[in-house]
């Protein structure tokens, strides 16, 4: 596959130059290098960012940091999957932890309550299969009355199921494995390892199972970085082929097969990561589309859904009409459905291959935005979060994740014909609102992308990007946003002091939008609410394996804890670790932010440029003296790190100096004004005793404070204001340490002690 062609004419255009210097100017203003306060519109934005991120006194910032009460997530209905059989519609509800059975009128006739997240639903021969749970995932077999008749233990986060005769195949997303089930006995008879990252969806065609992988699994420095589709022969239950998608393909969400089995279609983002992120026009940063897999040749060809001046952000569910003539894609980012005329599209592809089409060769179709101009119809939907998609007859059913209902599309009339509303959805709180905005491409100039485009699940897309925030010519990996507000500075080089600044800069310089501060605050609240998934490298009960236990001892004895101390596994400082020494002149001897290792198993490839897609290679880079067994043990521990089961966590510490507020830095002469504590578990003890102690280099107590927090609801933060504050010594500040402990009344830790050093 070739890289994307260079757009030199656009690069040299006056428009790009204008955008480039406007971006640089705004970035300098946010950083305080120049003053734009008096400039209309721009000045207002700069003032808002400064107010939000600098603040006045520490006490004021602490009070503003308190999250309002949140609605428990299980109060929301969030549709993750839809199935139709015998005039009944089945809806999987992830957060509400239910499977609904609806009649044609949209009335609930039966409900199964799972009491854990529901990831998917499938109906075959009057049997309903519900995919539930995370680390200890299961398939629940239900009868027509939605009563459980069997439970089958599978793998980590079962996300898709395909039933073929007496066998069923289940994609276990985070194990990267397929469970093969004998339906006559309801037992797993085989496990198939998938050569991909996050097996998220599957489709069957001609005796083959096509497994779509969510993200690229290769190193970010390779010539082609893309997600892939793994082909499994269902006669032998063995992998026969791995199909690499187009360069930049990621955020894969759905896969479907044509009725004749000749083609398989895969929905995904097409990232233009080889260009600097200087503009959005014509899909300069991200485009959106699908790949067509020829099941005979096992080759893939990509097509964009976007129009020249209008994006089709975040394609999700995908399906082919029963007559094989129409391809339907749910556009989650723009709250639409796209209907593509397959016959017209195939004719245009054939013309290209014959040498008389609109582009020179088939591999150039992915770069030609008008390709589907006379082949597609956009249908606006009346809900938010179009994701799951299935077809029955001439109707398409689209599960709308955030509004908790199902849009029904008339494929003949190409319009929405109704909505199945079957629950009373509570009003969105700040966290839910922020999550909606994070995935909403309607906020973006020309709707090309949302935050999810580069941060699927608010994590990382596995690609290197050349952002403007630290100069051009130095691409680096997108970072996970988990704990970003807890672990400043942010970005790979620590160029942004806080996550609050980064959120606002991202909206301005990546989505080219000026948002209301209240909206930006909700995005902060959503990101602060994120919790790590249990690592698949742990035992099912959440404990460390024997190898990881040995690795933990090495982690401590080899000095890894110096830069990666628990509970956040980062010292929140920047260091030159030598990873840029051999790069081009733009990178030589640059310092890098110490990343948190919490949930690092989901954030590969690793190092600033994603050069390693194997954690053992990372360990060898930093500890070449270790034996192969020690390397494996240490890697297993690092890949096991999560939240350690903590009931509470210190979220943000506020330190003032010279009237400005920074996060998590003890500044000589400054003052620790306070901090926030977040309740992280539904089962957390209701009362927590919180102690803060500031000590000098000789462990002498400078000042201490103790308080009690009671009845803090899960996923809410409480502010601890330290009155006049803890004054940090101006002289002999080295060695000054702030330690915050959270315990129950019996003195037992409810969280790993939080230690912040000068």
Image: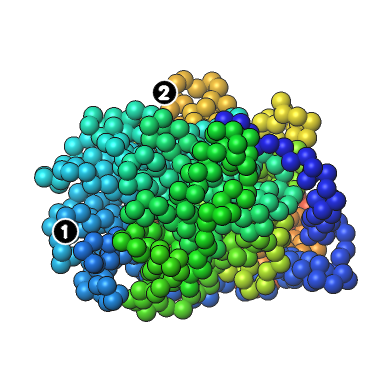
Residue 663 x %, y %: 67, 58
Q: What's the mark number on residue 684?
A: none
Rendering coords of residue 278 (x, y %): 74, 49
Mark 1 vs mark 2: give the one in front.
1
In this orientation, which residue lies closer to the viewer: 488 or 6? 6
Q: Residue at x 75, y 34 (%)?
A: 587
Q: Dot 2: what SS?
A: helix
Left or right placement of residue 295 versus residue 154 in this view = right
Is the residue 514 above or below the residue 135 in the image? below
Position of residue 358 in the picture relative to residue 147 (left or right): right
Q: Quadrant of the N terminus?
A: top right
Quote the CA–CA distance across marks 1 and 2. Answer: 50 Å
- Name the mark on residue 629: 2
Horizontal arrangement in the rendering, residue 616 relative to residue 582 (left or right): left
Residue at position x 48%, y 33% in the image? 244
Sequence-wise first label, 1 or 2 = 1
Residue 203 coordinates in the image, percent (x, y): 34, 44
Secondary-structure class at tag 1? loop
Residue 126 - label? 1
Q: Position of residue 198 (x, y in %)?
A: 42, 43
């Amino acid at each position: 596959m070739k890289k994307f062609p260079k757009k030199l004419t656009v690069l040299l255009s006056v428009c790009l130059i204008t955008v480039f210097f406007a971006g640089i100017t705004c970035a300098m203003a946010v950083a305080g290098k120049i003053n734009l306060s008096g400039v209309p519109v721009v000045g207002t934005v700069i003032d808002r960012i400064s107010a939000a991120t600098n603040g006045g006194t520490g006490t004021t910032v602490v009070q503003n940091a308190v999250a309002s009460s949140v609605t428990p997530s299980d109060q929301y209905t969030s549709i993750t999957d839809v199935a139709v059989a015998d005039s009944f519609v089945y809806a999987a509800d992830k957060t509400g932890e239910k499977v609904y059975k609806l009649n044609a009128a949209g009335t609930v006739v039966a409900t199964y309550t799972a009491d854990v997240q529901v990831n998917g639903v499938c109906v075959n021969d009057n049997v309903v299969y519900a995919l539930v749970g995370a680390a200890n995932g299961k398939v629940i077999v239900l009868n027509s009355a939605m009563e459980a008749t069997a439970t089958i233990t599978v793998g980590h986060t079962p996300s898709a199921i395909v039933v073929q005769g007496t066998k069923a195949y289940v994609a276990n997303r985070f194990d990267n494995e397929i469970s093969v089930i004998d339906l006559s006995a309801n037992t797993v008879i085989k496990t198939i390892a998938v050569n991909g990252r996050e097996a998220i969806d599957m489709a069957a065609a001609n005796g083959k199972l096509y497994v779509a992988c969510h993200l690229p699994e290769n190193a970010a420095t390779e010539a082609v970085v893309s997600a892939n589709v793994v082909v499994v022969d269902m006669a032998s239950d063995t992998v026969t082929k791995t199909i690499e998608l187009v360069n930049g393909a990621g955020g894969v969400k759905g896969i479907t097969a044509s009725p004749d089995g000749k083609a398989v279609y895969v929905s995904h983002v097409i990232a233009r990561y080889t260009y600097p992120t200087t503009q959005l026009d014509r899909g300069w940063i991200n485009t959106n589309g699908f790949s067509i897999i020829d099941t005979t040749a096992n080759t893939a060809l990509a097509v964009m859904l976007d129009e020249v001046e209008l994006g089709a952000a975040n394609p999700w569910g995908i399906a082919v009409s029963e007559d094989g003539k129409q391809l339907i894609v749910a556009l989650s980012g723009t709250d639409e459905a796209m209907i593509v005329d397959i016959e017209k599209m195939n004719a245009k592809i054939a013309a290209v291959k014959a040498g008389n089409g609109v582009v020179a060769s088939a591999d150039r179709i992915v770069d030609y935005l008008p390709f589907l101009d006379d082949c597609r119809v956009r249908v606006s939907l009346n809900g938010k979060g179009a994701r799951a998609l299935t077809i029955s007859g001439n109707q398409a059913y689209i599960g709308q994740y955030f509004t908790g209902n199902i849009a029904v599309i008339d494929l003949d009339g190409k319009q929405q014909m109704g909505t199945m509303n079957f629950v009373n959805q509570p009003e969105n709180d700040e966290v839910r609102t922020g999550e909606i905005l994070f995935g909403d491409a309607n906020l973006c100039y020309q709707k090309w992308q949302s935050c999810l485009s580069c941060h699927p699940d608010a994590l990382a897309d596995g690609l290197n990007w050349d952002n403007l925030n630290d100069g051009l010519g130095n691409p680096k990996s997108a970072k996970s946003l988990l704990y970003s507000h807890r672990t400043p500075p942010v970005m790979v080089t620590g160029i942004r002091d806080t996550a609050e600044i980064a959120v606002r800069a991202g909206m301005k310089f990546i989505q080219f939008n000026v948002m209301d501060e209240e909206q930006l605050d909700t995005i902060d609240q959503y990101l602060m609410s994120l919790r790590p998934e249990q690592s698949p490298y742990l035992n099912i009960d959440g404990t460390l394996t024997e190898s990881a236990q040995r690795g933990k001892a090495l982690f401590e004895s080899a000095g890894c804890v110096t830069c990666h101390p628990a509970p956040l596994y980062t010292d929140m400082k920047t260091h030159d670790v030598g990873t840029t020494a051999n790069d081009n002149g733009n990178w030589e001897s640059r310092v890098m932010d110490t990343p948190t290792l919490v949930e690092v198993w989901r954030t590969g490839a690793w190092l600033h440029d994603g050069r390693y897609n194997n954690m053992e290679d990372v360990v060898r880079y930093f500890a070449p003296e270790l034996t192969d067994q020690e390397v494996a043990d240490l890697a297993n521990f690092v890949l096991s790190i999560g939240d350690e089961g903590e009931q509470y966590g210190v979220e943000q510490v506020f330190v003032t100096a010279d009237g400005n507020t920074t996060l998590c830095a003890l500044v000589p002469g400054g003052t620790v004004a306070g901090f926030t504590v977040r309740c992280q578990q539904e089962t957390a003890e209701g009362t927590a005793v919180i102690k803060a102690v500031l000590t000098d280099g000789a462990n002498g107590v400078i000042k201490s404070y103790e308080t009690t927090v009671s009845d803090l609801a899960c996923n809410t933060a409480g502010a601890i204001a330290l009155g006049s504050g803890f004054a940090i010594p101006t002289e002999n500040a080295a060695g000054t340490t702030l330690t915050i402990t959270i315990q129950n009344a019996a003195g037992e830790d409810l969280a790993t002690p939080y230690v912040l050093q000068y």
